[in-house]
Image (spheres, rainbow, N blue to C red):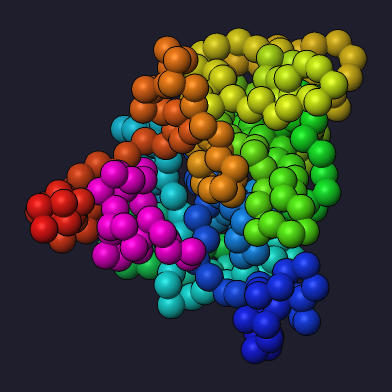
Amino acid sequence: MDHTDYKASAGNMNLPKYVTNMPHQHALILVGYDTIYGVHMTQYHHEEHKYQMILELDLPEPAKTRYRKMRETWPEMPLVLCNDVKDPLMVPDLGGGTRPDFSANFFPGLFPLDQLKPEEEESMHFFPWSADIMKPVMDAPFKVKVKRVVLFRPFNHQEILPKYANYIIWGSDTEAHMTHWQTAHMASNKYDTPAFGPDYDHIMSLKSAPDWVHPSLLRAGITVSVPAIRLRAPGKKRKASIPLTRPFRYNQKFEVLYRGIGQPYKVRAGYTFVFGPQVSTSPAIMPVPDPSDPDANNPELTLFMTEAPEEYWADQRRTSNLKDEINNE
C-alpha cells in the first residue's frame, strides 16, 4: 500500500488529501488464560491509534506458556504485546484481515513515567516499550496469529459522551472480560488545535463469565451500561465528569444493564490491567485533579497501570535516574 501522501494527510486531518495511517508499533493488552485476547490501547489524538480493537490471538507454545506463568505470578500486571519495530503495521491491517499474523514480543507493565527523559515525554510518537527502555519477555520476536476479530471500531469524533459509561463484555467458556466503550468526542472548535475527550480507557477481566449471557453472545461480545459510573454531571450543561481512579476493585460486585436498558444484571470484577484518561485523552484537556480532594495525591490518579519490574528495564535505565542526572546538570 502506498503511504507517500501520509504526511500531507496528517498535517490537515480535517481535509486529508488521502486517508491512510502511518504503519507503526501498537500496544495490545493481553487478557485471558485459556483463550488469549489482545485489546488495543487507544489514543484519541493520534491518527494511528484512533481505534478500539479486540482480537482473539494464537501465540506459539513457548510464548503462550511464558505468558500463562507470568499471569499466574502477576495476576494484575498488564502484559503488553507489541508488534516488532521491524514489522510496523496499521491497526486496520489487523481489524480488516489484511494481516493474518505479525511479528511481536510482550512486556510486563509500564516503565516508570517519572524516569522518562523530557524529550521522550514530549515526543508525539513516543513508544514506551522500545528496546532502549524495556526488555521483552521472550529472547526473540515470535509470530502471532489473529484467529478472529471480536471488535474493530474506528472512532467518530462527533459521538457524544453518554450519561453513564458503556462497556463491551466478551469472552469464552468460564472467562469473560470488559473494556470501556470510548467516545473520543471532539472538544475543540475549528480555530483551536484539535483535542479529543475527556474519556478513559479501561481494560479488565471479570472474576468469571456471567451466567446470564448465552455462550454465543459472550463469544461475539455484548454491550452494557454501568449505572455506577456517571460520565456527565447533572444539570443543563451536563459537564463531563469522568472517573479518575479505578471504579471497581477485585471481587467487587456491580450492576450492568444489557444494551443500556431493562433490569440490572450482576457481575463480579476481576483484575484491572489499564485504567484512566492519561494515555487516550488529548493532553490539552486532561482532567486536573482538585487539590482539595483527599484523593488528589493518589498515585493511581489518571492512570492505573502497574510499573514494570526493574529486571525488565533496559540496562541503561537501571543504572541511574535520568531525571536526577538532568537536574544535577
Q: Is residue 116 magenta?
A: yes
Residue under the point 36% across and 52% down? 107
Give, as a single range, the part of the protein colored magenta.
107-135
Residue under the point 33% across and 45% down? 113
Residue under the point 43% across and 69% down? 84
Task: Kindly indicate the quadrant of the structure image that contains residue 99.
Answer: bottom right
Task: Kindly indicate the quadrant of the structure image that contains residue 298.
Answer: top left
Count of residue discs: 0
User: Which of the image's four quarters has the N terminus?
Assistant: bottom right
Q: Is residue 126 above or below residue 229?
A: below
Relative to 28, 120 lies left or right:
left
Is any atom of residue 313 visible in this view?
A: yes
User: Which of the image's four quarters has the C terminus?
Assistant: bottom left
Q: Main secondary structure of the magenta part?
A: loop
Q: Nearer the viewer, residue 37 or 325?
A: 325
Q: Is residue 240 above or below residue 110?
A: above
Is any atom of residue 203 visible in this view?
A: no
Task: Kindly indicate the quadrant of the structure image that contains residue 2.
Answer: bottom right
Q: Position of residue 18 (x, y in %)?
A: 77, 81
Residue farthest toward the right in the current orientation of the protein? 262
Q: Nearer the viewer, residue 198 or 65?
A: 198
Q: Position of residue 109 (x, y in %)?
A: 36, 43
